[in-house]
Image (tube, helix red, strand yellow):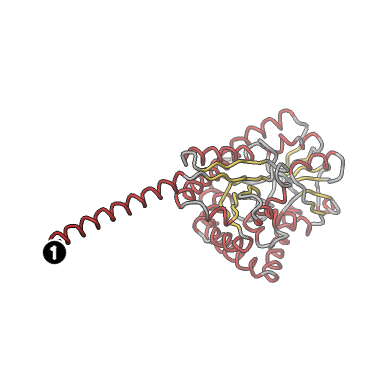
Amino acid sequence: MDRRNFITLLAGATLVGGCSKSQFEDKNININRNRKVRLKLATSWPDNFPIMGTGVVEFAKRVKEASGGSIEIEVYGKNRLVPALAVFDATSSGNIDIFHSGPYYWKGKNIALSIFGGVPFGMSPIETMSWFKNGGGLELWREIYDRYNLYPLLGGNTGPQMGGWFRKKIESLADLQGLKMRIPGLGGELFSRLGVNPILLPAGEIFTALERGMIDAAEWVGPALDISMGFYKVAKYYYSGWAEPGSILELTFNKHSWNKLSKEQQAIIEMASNELNSNMLYNFQSENSSALEKLKREGEIYIDKFPDEVTQKAKEESKKLMEEFASQNRDFERVWKSYSDFLNKTKEWSNISYKSYLEDRG
């Protein structure tokens, strides 16, 4: 073989080799994109629970549709795989892939996690979302969850929550002394400073405890969910609140389960979680409005604000509470600084815009 023929043959072999590599890579990409992934998601809510439970089911459907069927998420209501408040540990250990719940339940793990769920007298829903997305909240949250082998996504916002259902009228601070009340997170810590005995109960146990007098009051969410729980049948006094002004819910992955997904699959899930996050807030606004009308029409209930004495004392104790936790826990100090700095930055605009408008609108 002469030199010219050898070079021609070598060039042809290189070209064929290059094409084969390109085709092989394309094939691998297609295999990766079409690889079926099945994930188990456990919630802290009963099956088909309004808004929160049904929202997660819709999320799973949207992920399957958007991924062309390559991602299938099976949703399990509370107690079907694990108990309602065991989802954190089950996902951390890898027994399940994802959980849907609220960060305020995990203060026993690290009190700093309560801030991500919402702060008494803190940010409104839109301010909270802005902090997560633009103020460093999401990065801090993921940094701390990483220690537990978890990767969180925003999974909903309840909007402002009510202060709770009480079996007797609250006319002063004295009326709160010794009351047993179902309330989680920092709200529970604050009510304990007001003389209340806070108790953590999952959704399915609250009504029975209230009905049987095992607890004297219960904070849940707002009219849309409270009416379905039937609290108005056993507790007549319904108070607006300041303990949870913009509570978020979470869609949290086991870190290994998240990392085994392709970048494309992760992007699909993140987009679907953003849709879930915003849609849930819209749904709560709409459903709370309708349920409030129904409660007032059908139930013999009394809706009111807490007495000024109670609210003022709560404000004072809330400030002390946050300072105390910040002095005891380095994570809490860091997260609280980020949160409070953002609140101080954003509240002037919120007061000039939203607050002024709502007051003028009446």
Q: In this view, does 165 lie to the left or right of 49?
A: right
Q: Where is residue 214 in the image (x, y as percent from the top left)?
A: 86, 45
Under mark 1, the amino acid is Arg
Front residue of 84 and 112: 84
* Residue drawn 58% across the image and 54% down it: 152
Q: In this view, does 138 lie to the left or right of 218?
A: left
| Relative vertical location of residue 17 with respect to residue 216 in this rendering, above or below | below
| Relative vertical location of residue 204 with respect to residue 185 in this rendering, above or below | above
Give the position of the C terminus as an image quadrant.
top right
Under circle 1, the secondary element is helix
Front residue of 162 and 155: 155
| Relative vertical location of residue 84 with respect to residue 116 in this rendering, above or below | above
Q: Quadrant of residue 229?
A: top right
Mark 1 crowdedness (10 Å alpha carbons): few <14, some 14-19, many ≥20 = few
The tally of labels here is 1
Give the position of the N terminus as an image quadrant.
bottom left
Q: Can you see residue 224?
A: no
Q: Is residue 57 left or right of residue 182?
A: left
Q: Residue under circle 1?
A: 3
* Residue drawn 71% across the image and 28% down it: 297
Front residue of 298 and 107: 107
Q: Can you see residue 13?
A: yes
